[in-house]
Amino acid sequence: MGVCGYLFLPWKCLVVVSLRLLFLVPTGVPVRSGDATFPKAMDNVTVRQGESATLRCTIDNRVTRVAWLNRSTILYAGNDKWCLDPRVVLLSNTQTQYSIEIQNVDVYDEGPYTCSVQTDNHPKTSRVHLIVQVSPKIVEISSDISINEGNNVSLTCIATGRPEPTVTWRHISPKAVGFVSEDEYLEIQGITREQSGDYECSASNDVAAPVVRRVKVTVNYPPYISEAKGTGVPVGQTGTLQCEASAVPSAEFQWYKDDKRLVEGKKGVKVENRPFLSKLIFLNVSEHDYGNYTCVASNKLGHTNASITLFELSEPTSSTLLQEVKTTALTPGKGPGAISEVSNGTSRRAGCVWLLPLLVLVLHLLLKF
């Protein structure tokens, strides 16, 4: 349908008016623009949805009657409004111009509009086409999805607008943002864990800013242990074994020693679990704590394990430390007047070394007598 229809008038009045319009807009009159005796109407009018469209028709003083029509519907005849739509208003009706305005234009207003005039008992017409542009809008998009690694993924993004919008997909991941495809449908064959993340759908037609929506794709995969290192701890100290595992969903951890599972609450042993990390903490390491331990990481897709060793680390004894101090204190200086560092942080001059030969001689004489 066009912008509007006829007003409902009493039937007698309607008949009279219809007869008067027969010579104004007769059936079968060809559309003619650029006629020398009739200045042509304006070119095609392009407006955005929600804006106002102005339709102008240039006339002269030879014109006796004028009208604007939308297809077969009369909008205005002279100053008389023939349509019920309040959005259609008369802007001007002068000896040089006859124009109307359609406010708050919508897509159903798009189409041909005709300016019809009567001059010297010869009706002439000129046509203008109204084009309505519509901002892009995403009307359908896939929901967030969780899928196992290796399976196929199909994402959909349907958009509307005038002109028809261009739809593009991009993969947004922590490592990079990459273009994926230019289509409403995105197909991923044998998806990998590196292809997880957000997929952004953008719809653009240059009428307004692009419309953007995102779909989150979660790729599930079994655990793999990325780090598991042995450690050495002296007896009586605190020791920690650490096991890191990557997995989606997050891995659950278990610890074993000699095929025996270690549980939280065992005397002297504490287990701390996080989504991707597990720690086995020995609060006071004893001799029987040393040995090989197994970390097991598992989720619904599988499990993996790694062996970690807690070994004894010798701790320096007090006698060893004392011997080191004595050795340091008795180390002679290099040459007369040298400075020797001792454990209390002071220094002394070793300048009496030259008296030793004299003392040996005196001792020899005393023993002789």
Image (cartoon, rainbow, N blue to C red):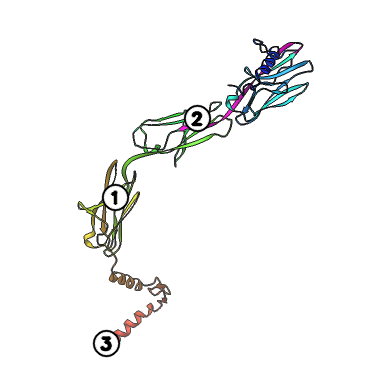
**Magenta region:** 119-140
Disc number placed over residue 125 in the picture, else none: none
Label 3 SS = helix
Query: Residue 225: percent from the left, percent from the top?
Result: 31, 46
Asked whether the beta carbons under mark 1 and mark 3 sit within 8 Å of each other, the answer is no
Q: In the visual, does 7 lie left or right of 189? A: right
Q: Quadrant of residue 216?
A: top left
- Give the CA distance from mark 1 to mark 3: 85 Å
Give the foreground label among 1 and 2. 2
Is residue 156 rendered to the left or right of residue 15? Answer: left
Residue 315: give x, y in percent of width and height. Answer: 29, 65
Q: Nearer the viewer, residue 112 or 306?
A: 112
Mark 1 vs mark 3, foreground winner is 1
Q: Circle 1: is it few (<14), some (14-19), or many (20+) Cα within 10 Å?
A: many
Labelled disc at residue 159 = 2
Which amino acid is tagged 2? Ala
Residue at mark 1: 253
Report which quarter residue 82 is drawn in. top right
Q: Is residue 127 magenta?
A: yes
From the viewer's perspective, is the residue at label 3 or at label 2 nearer? 2
Which residue is farthest right? 61
Above or below: residue 217 compared with residue 79: below
The answer to whether the residues at label 3 and label 2 have Cβ atoms under 8 Å apart is no
- Sequence-first tag of 3 and 2: 2
**Direction bottom: furthest residue:** 369
Q: Quadrant of the C terminus?
A: bottom left
Callout 3: 10 Å neighbours few (<14), some, many (20+)? few
**Residue at 42 percent of width and 73 percent of height:** 339
Residue 368 — which label?
Answer: 3
Disc 3 to disc 2, C-alpha distance: 121 Å
- Residue shown at the point (43%, 34%) measured from the top left: 142
How packed mark 2 is, by other alpha carbons closer than 10 Å (few <14, some 14-19, many 20 or more), is: many
